[in-house]
Amino acid sequence: MKAIILAAGRGSRMKSLTDERPKCLVELRGKPLLEWQLESLRAAGIRDIAVVTGYKRERLADRGLSEFHNPRWADTNMVSSLACAEAWLQDQPCIVSYSDIFYSPTAVQSLMNSTATLAVTYDPDWLQLWTDRFGDPLLDAETFRLTDANTLAEIGNKPQSVEDVQGQYMGLLRFTPEGWAEVVRLRAQLTPAQRDSMHMTNTLQRVIDAGRVPIEAVAYAGEWGEVDSSDDLSLYQ
């Protein structure tokens, strides 16, 4: 199995911390976020790892990683960056990781063990972390609802209460070639502008609405975090 790290964006909410480096090179506890991801992926047994670059791509060279480049990184969103790695996605199952998160190898292994066409990890005990980050957890939270079969029923919408959030989507996924083909099919129905603007959770919701590919939701109880600001860095320190 291969892994793809999405590291094309600048991370503008990090302000001056990303003036000279991509967001994935911001340091947490003495090492870049990218190293947290690489260590967990490799500890889970994955050796073939690619990074999708964009902003400051030269800073990610010479790290022993395959590279897919999104030259339109400033005008597109994450799914467009992922599409740059289509050669891998069409070939075999791939773990896909955001580049502004950290997690343990067990999160990766849980996805590797999944037999689903498409799977995502989530944190069922999200509420305290989001309260620590935002005060009011609903300021940033998105809906995350499950079916009785433990597949996703809804993701990425604005919740009305914490009951609308059964878990926190982490930004760590597993695509099979069949799962990616469904994303390609749905993206083909959109205008170029719509494709450029689509977020990952919007895309997952479209997959849910189409009803052809169930998305397995894999619960994860280990340490993890998302880094969107200098305040997040201080919290996780």
Image (cartoon, rainbow, N blue to C red):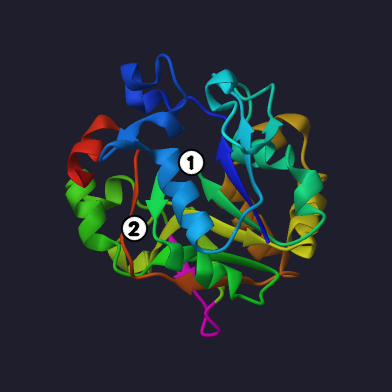
- Three-letter amino acid code at disc 1? Ser
Considering every residue shown, the one lying at the far bottom of the view is: 148
Label 1 to label 2: alpha-carbon separation: 29 Å
Please tell me whether residue 146 belongs to the stretch shown in magenta.
Answer: yes
Labelled disc at residue 160: 2
* Residue 126 within the segment the image draws in magenta: no
Discs 1/2, front: 1
Image location of residue 71, percent across then percent down: 69, 21
- Secondary structure under the numbered disc 1 in the rendered image: loop
Residue under numbered circle 1: 99
| Quadrant housing the N terminus | bottom right
Q: Nearer the viewer, residue 78 or 42?
A: 42
Q: Residue at x 59, y 22 (%)?
A: 57
In terms of secondary structure, what is the magenta stretch mainly? loop
Query: Which contiguous range is marked in magenta?
Result: 143-150
Q: Residue at x 32, y 33 (%)?
A: 27
Q: Residue at x 29, y 68 (%)?
A: 125
Residue 225: percent from the left, percent from the top? 33, 51
Whether pointer 1 and pointer 2 mark residues with C-beta atoms closer than 8 Å, the reply is no
Q: Position of residue 214 (x, y in %)?
A: 66, 72
Amino acid on which the number 2 mark rests in the picture: Gln
Please identify the quarter of the rendering in which residue 219 is found: bottom left
Above or below, 83 relative to 69:
below
| Of 177 and 30, the residue lying toward us | 30
> Which residue is more in the foreground, 68 or 191?
68
